[in-house]
Image: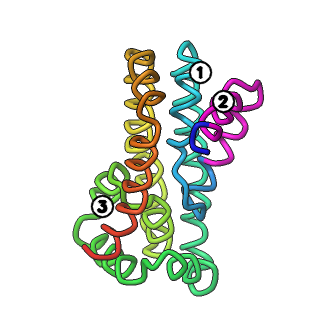
Amino acid sequence: MIRKLYDWTMRVAEHPRAMWGLGAISFAESSFFPIPPDVVVVPMVLARREQAWLIATVCTLTSVAGGLFGYAIGYYLMETLGAWLVQLYGMQAKAHQFEESYAEWGLWVILIKGLTPIPYKLVTIVSGAAHFALLPFVVASLITRGARFFLIAALLRAYGEPIRDFIERRLTLVTTMFLVALVGGFAVLRYI
């Protein structure tokens, strides 16, 4: 089953409209969707290594645009939609803790949390709820999201064939590691 899913993902990654799907997932993940865009970035860069920089750019820009949507949810709708999303992901304690951190650390909260496995949607929603200044939020988001996606793109562009070979030979291991990282990001958020 994992092999069929992988083969399907690689076929979809080569599709001419795959970039639109990447943009939609990247946008949604920054504000409400649980699956990170890396799931799409990795197969797309492996399938189109010559477009690695374009893929990273699209992912970064749509992630920041989605982050602005998350910011708006926190800023304007924290008592309703924002609270529901925070509760849905079990992030109530962390949301309150992040809000307090903004007073002391401000920009550093966004810069550090944007690179960690902690869900970026929490950063965006809480930034809006804390009424963090919009321009520094956008700049910090561009830096952290860009660093993440361009690093992935650079590694896959440079070492794509050995990485693809590794993934294909150890597909179950790679899938398990991804799921552990995804669940671990939420677990870290909840218990630390």
Using the image, determine if residue 46 lies above or below residue 190.
above
| Mark 3 and mark 1: Cα distance apart in space | 34 Å
Q: Which span of residues is magenta-colored?
A: 4-25
Tag 2 residue: 13
In the rendered image, the quadrant that contains the N terminus is top right
Residue 42 in the figure: left or right of residue 100:
right
In front: label 3 or label 2: 2
Among the 4 quarters of the image, the one containing residue 189 = bottom left
Q: Earlier in the sequence, mark 1 or mark 2?
A: 2
Query: Label 2 sits on what residue type?
Result: Ala
Q: Are marks 1 and 2 in contact (CB under 8 Å)?
A: yes
**Residue at the image position 62 percent from the left and 50 percent from the top:** 27
Q: Earlier in the sequence, mark 3 or mark 1?
A: 1
Q: Nearer the viewer, mark 3 or mark 1?
A: 1
Relative placement, left or right, of 29 versus 172 is: right
Instruction: Name the residue nearer the viewer: 142 or 150.
Output: 150
Q: What residue did someone put label 1 on?
A: 47
Identify the residue at horizontal 41%, vertical 41% (top origin).
Answer: 174
Query: What amino acid does circle 1 point to?
Result: Ala
Instruction: Choose top left, top right, bottom left or bottom right for residue 41.
Output: top right
Q: Which residue is mark 3?
A: 109
- Relative vertical location of residue 25 with respect to residue 128 in this rendering, above or below: above
